Amino acid sequence: MKPSVRCAGLTALAALLATACAPQTSSNSSSGKDEKTGTLRVWLFQEVGNAPKEKVVDSVVAGFEKAHEGTKVKVEYIPVETRAQRVKAAFNDPRSAPDVIEYGNTDTAGYVKDGGLLDVTKEFGDWSEAKDTDPTAKQSVTVDGRLYGAPFYVGVRALYYRTDVFEELGLSAPRTMDELASTARKIRAAKPELYGLAVGGAYTYGAMPFVWANGGELANGKGGSYASGIDSPEARKGIEAYTSLFGDDNCPAAKCAGMGGNDTVSAFAAGKAGMAIGGDFSHTAVEAGKVKGKYAVVPLPGVKSGSIAPAFAGGNNIGVLKSTSHRTLAVQLMERLASKKTQSELFDAMGFLPTFTDVRTQAAAKEPFVKPFVRTLSAGTRFVPASPAWARIDSSLVLPTMFQEVVSGKKDVTKASEDAAKKMNSAFGSAG
């Protein structure tokens, strides 16, 4: 997820304040207008505890308005849960649409297919900060080689574990996935009131590292044409590794099959699990729980000793709607919101991991808890297929259903993965 803008000869801060190096106007705005004054509307996501985010954004807006006489910026914070309906309505009615939006990085391909996002390939390439963007972050705004926004922040998951429990039982942080499973069972055997490793049948992005670490893929293809890979021998090995963690010897299926990511982190924070797979964004919740001061975080181990399992690169992006009548101004505002300066301030305020590698390194030096997540990112992350079909696959719970069918004993891994692959391929086919 990369945000970058090039104004030759300017420092990063000066570039943020400069108005002379405006992006060149291209003709792919559907409004056909490029007004240089007026009001820009921005939709950003409402966070839990949104005040620190608002403070950072207010500062960006104030600087932008000062640098652009006759321009005002109106920011609205919208609920993440209802974003699909709001954004779809905006695409259908340009008059009520914002100029700039924050959107989930898995939404990119769908929004592009709907014709809602502006192609900013030229401007992104001309952004001096772009060279420091994490490659996976850049991938999250890319569809068929064109860029449709700037990465805003990135989120990855790692392994949280109870240092007090590990010390009491003489355990060490696991270095392989096999050790992870055996360590979880040792904890459960010694302390049956705890889950060894809290896992969830509805925790797609906690399960996928097991698939990827074993050589499997969600799907194969490019250019909008994909075929499911979830039924390959390698993927099935990963599915087996993950679903084997459901049982009375670790996390009973009756309690854990329906759990999602938030549930597993909540169980860990409440002192009900020896380990959990949580994100950098889970840190605040864990710190507020009963395990404060009694846990540590390491990258989720891979198959080979010392390796790191590939993690899903989550996070959000900032984009410009194709219907904007303020193309140049909107792109400039997008770049400011996604700039190094803003991302650094959002890390301090909200804990959002920056999408720029240099800013993220600075963040890790500042806050030790970030280091295992930065190591995970550096080891290589994965992303979902760049297909508009992914939104349908995700919302119809294809993968959680597959995991839960295996965990419940309703289907074996082969049958469950075959059925999931058929559903995925149907969605890919419908997407064109």
Image (cartoon, helix red, strand yellow):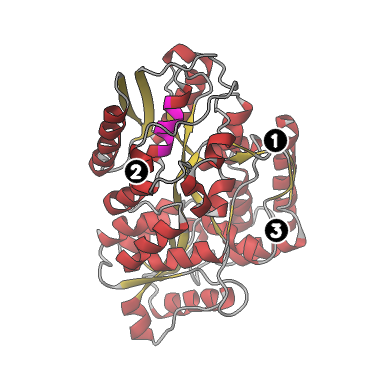
**Residue 159 in sight here:** no
Residue annotated with mark 2:
14
Q: Position of residue 112 (x, y in %)?
A: 60, 30
Q: CA distance from mark 2 to mark 3?
A: 56 Å
Dot 3: within a 10 Å radius of its alpha carbon, few (fewer than 14), some, or many (20 or more) residues?
many
Q: Single out the residue that lies furthest toward the front.
A: 9
| Image quarter hosting the C terminus | top right
Q: Amino acid at mark 3?
A: Val
Q: CA distance from mark 3 to mark 1?
A: 21 Å
Q: Nearer the viewer, mark 2 or mark 3?
A: 2
Residue 187 lies in the magenta-colored region: no
**Residue 232 in sight here:** yes
**Badge 2 vs badge 3, beta-carbon distance below 8 Å:** no
Q: Residue at x 49, y 42 (%)?
A: 127
Residue annotated with mark 1:
427
Q: Which residues are magenta?
A: 329-335
Q: Position of residue 385 (x, y in %)?
A: 65, 45
Query: In the figure, 187 relative to 61: above or below?
Result: below
Circle number at residue 187: none
Looking at the image, tell me whether mark 3 or mark 1 is earlier in sequence order: 3
Q: CA distance from mark 1 to mark 2?
A: 46 Å
Q: Main secondary structure of the magenta part?
A: helix
Q: Residue at x 44, y 63 (%)?
A: 373
Residue annotated with mark 3:
413
Dot 1: within a 10 Å radius of its alpha carbon, few (fewer than 14), some, or many (20 or more) residues?
many
